[in-house]
Image: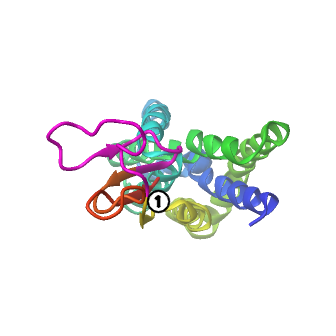
């Protein structure tokens, strides 16, 4: 896939992910009556989302450092689909809405910082800023579309239909882009630690290599490509 189509796919998914960000705000006039909330409680539900999203940005960064940005994007976007669906289908009042919207926020950071890292790795310095700009602009488009689409759905079939529309867009976004970055287990061959000029761990029957190209964690077992039979074979987990 060329860079333009790849970026367009990511931007489309980002716009779809962004619908849940403003779905609650779009439906707030209806939810005030349906959930019997005061203005203060309504604000707490929205604040719970922002607290969850703030935490998710820190969590996404830590996860990306450990398992790679691609795997972080995949797993967090999958969780975002689950929690958005739970919020749309199960929220029925202030307390359930507070908890479920908070959880939806906790999973939503995976489509932001990890993807910016992925974009930075794919594009060179001359195109990187433009590519990131398009991706961030796609989120703003999603916010605006959410205000219109969720409100229209609510007028047609009630507030829950608006939330379900936002949740369905989360699933669509995951199918469009998140699934492309699913972790894949592969069996390959690589030099053992001794071949790389490093001493194997004393008394260890297995060596773990973590400092390979970003996005891959490789664990040795079996036969080494450099030493031949009787050494180690690599198992690689793409992240």
Q: Give the colouring mode of the picture.
A: rainbow
x 46%, y 31%: residue = 58
Q: Where is residue 141 in the image (x, y as percent from the top left)?
A: 75, 49
Q: Where is residue 56 in the image (x, y as percent from the top left)?
A: 45, 37
Where 236 sits versus 39, above or below?
below
Where 199 sits versus 17, above or below?
above
234 lies left or right of 142: left
x 78%, y 57%: residue = 3
Q: Does residue 162 show up?
A: no
- Whether the magenta-drawn stretch holds residue 202 is answered as yes
- Is 141 or 77 nearer to us in this picture? 77
132 lies left or right of 168: right
- Is 80 or 196 nearer to us in this picture? 196
Q: Give the range drawn in magenta.
A: 190-217
Q: Position of residue 76 (x, y in %)?
A: 45, 51
Where 186 sits versus 121, above or below?
below
- Is 114 or 97 nearer to us in this picture? 114
Q: Quadrant of the N terminus?
A: bottom right
- Is 67 or 32 nearer to us in this picture? 67
| Magenta span main SS | loop
x 70%, y 48%: residue = 122
Q: How many marks?
A: 1
Q: Name the residue under label 1.
A: 81
Q: How crowded is mark 1: few (under 14 residues within 10 Å), some or many (20 or more)?
A: many
The quarter holding residue 178 reads: bottom right
Element carrying mark 1: helix
The quarter holding residue 234 reads: bottom left
Q: Where is residue 87 in the image (x, y as percent from the top left)?
A: 42, 55
Residue found at the very far left of the displayed protein: 203
């Amino acid at each position: 896939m060329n860079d333009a189509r790849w970026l367009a796919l990511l931007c489309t998914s980002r716009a779809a992910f962004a619908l849940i960000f403003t779905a609650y705000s779009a439906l707030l006039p209806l939810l005030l009556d349906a959930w019997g909330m005061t203005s203060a409680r309504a604000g707490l539900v929205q604040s719970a989302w922002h607290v969850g999203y703030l935490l998710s940005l820190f969590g996404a960064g830590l996860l990306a450092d450990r398992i790679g940005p691609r795997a972080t994007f995949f797993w967090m976007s999958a969780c975002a689909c689950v929690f958005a669906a739970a919020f749309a289908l199960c929220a029925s009042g202030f307390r359930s809405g507070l908890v479920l919207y908070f959880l939806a926020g906790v999973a939503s950071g995976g489509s932001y910082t990890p993807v910016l890292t992925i974009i930075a790795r794919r594009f060179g310095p001359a195109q990187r800023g433009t590519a990131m700009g398009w991706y961030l602009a796609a989120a703003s488009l999603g916010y605006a579309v959410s205000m219109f689409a969720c409100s229209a759905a609510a007028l047609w079939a009630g507030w829950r239909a608006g939330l379900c529309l936002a949740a369905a867009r989360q699933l669509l976004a995951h199918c469009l882009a998140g699934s492309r970055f699913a972790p894949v287990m592969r069996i390959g061959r690589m030099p053992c630690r001794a071949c790389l000029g490093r001493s194997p761990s004393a008394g260890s029957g297995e060596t773990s290599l973590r400092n390979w190209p970003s996005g891959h964690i490789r664990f040795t077992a079996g036969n080494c490509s450099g030493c031949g039979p009787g050494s180690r074979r690599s198992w690689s987990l793409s992240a």
